Amino acid sequence: MRRSSKKSSSSAAAAATAGDVQVNEKQNRKRKGVSTNLTSRKAQCGAARGVSKEIERIDQLFYTYADSSSGMIDPEGIETLCSHLEVPHTDVRILMLAWKMGCEKQGYFTLDEWRSGLKALRADTINKLKKAFPELVQEVTRPSNFQDFYPYAFRYCLTEDKKKCIEIPVACELLNLVLGLQFRPQVDKLVNYLKHQSEYKVINMDQWMGFLRFCNEAFSTLGDL
């Protein structure tokens, strides 16, 4: 009887110990879970604060160039921006920047457009924006992106809402700007033809897209023009 009692006591003690271990394990898991959640929340809060600070700096940079009455960066502000970037306002990289921002109106940058573009470029200072240009050029000149950039350049030059064509002189300047680096001999011949012909006064989107196909696929026939 005594042995049985001792065994029962030992079993009870073992069970109690096992129960304590399980309770401790559960408590430890809970603590770890709470700790992990807290760490995750802190990381999220830190990231959110970082993004908030970045947007704040991007906004501050915007208001350096924005017109106080319109709340936009207007042509004068863009000229000042170009001066600080040390590039001419006619540089194709400014057009690429407008494309990156998704700008809708030629010569004007809104705050939302500015935020979108500079955040994507990870640029919240002028120096960072300067350094982002080579990467931006590479991005635009990828074939898939250029197919979007090329018609955008035409739309961006439509100065009136319902306008669907651009004048020949503007088209020639734009061809030089957008296609000149890739297709210089072809563009020179095409521009020369457009300047000396008298049939067309303006160019529409279909014709504009035809120029790109012409340079890509049939530029060898330009000598016959």
Image (spheres, rainbow, N blue to C red):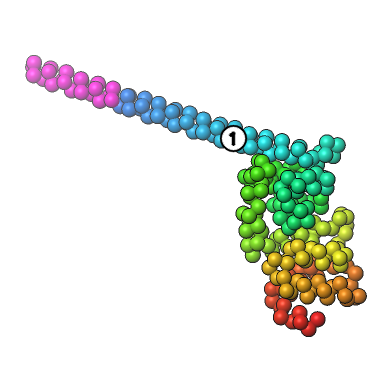
Above-or-below relation of 207 to 86: below
- Residue at image x 51%, y 33%? 43
Measured from the top left, where is residue 118 in percent x and y?
67, 45
Within the image, what quadrant is residue 71 found in? top right
Q: Is residue 148 magenta?
A: no
Work out which residue is located at the far top of the displayed protein and give it: 2
Q: Is residue 46 left or right of residue 194?
A: left
Within the image, what quadrant is residue 8 found in? top left
- Residue at image x 47%, y 31%? 39
Measured from the top left, where is residue 37 in percent x and y?
47, 31
Quarter occupied by the N terminus: top left
Within the image, what quadrant is residue 116 found in? top right
Q: Is residue 18 left or right of residue 172?
A: left
Q: Amino acid at mark 1?
A: Gly
Above-or-below relation of 32 to 215: above
Work out which residue is located at the far bottom of the displayed protein and give it: 224
For residue 65, say whether it is visible.
Answer: yes
Residue located beneath label 1 in the image: 50
Measured from the top left, where is residue 74 in percent x and y?
82, 45
Quarter occupied by the C terminus: bottom right
Q: Is residue 10 magenta?
A: yes
What span is colored magenta in the figure? 1-21
Task: State how many labels appear.
Answer: 1
- Residue at image x 83%, y 47%? 75
Above-or-below relation of 109 to 174: above
Mark 1: which secondary structure?
Answer: helix
- Residue at image x 71%, y 55%? 93
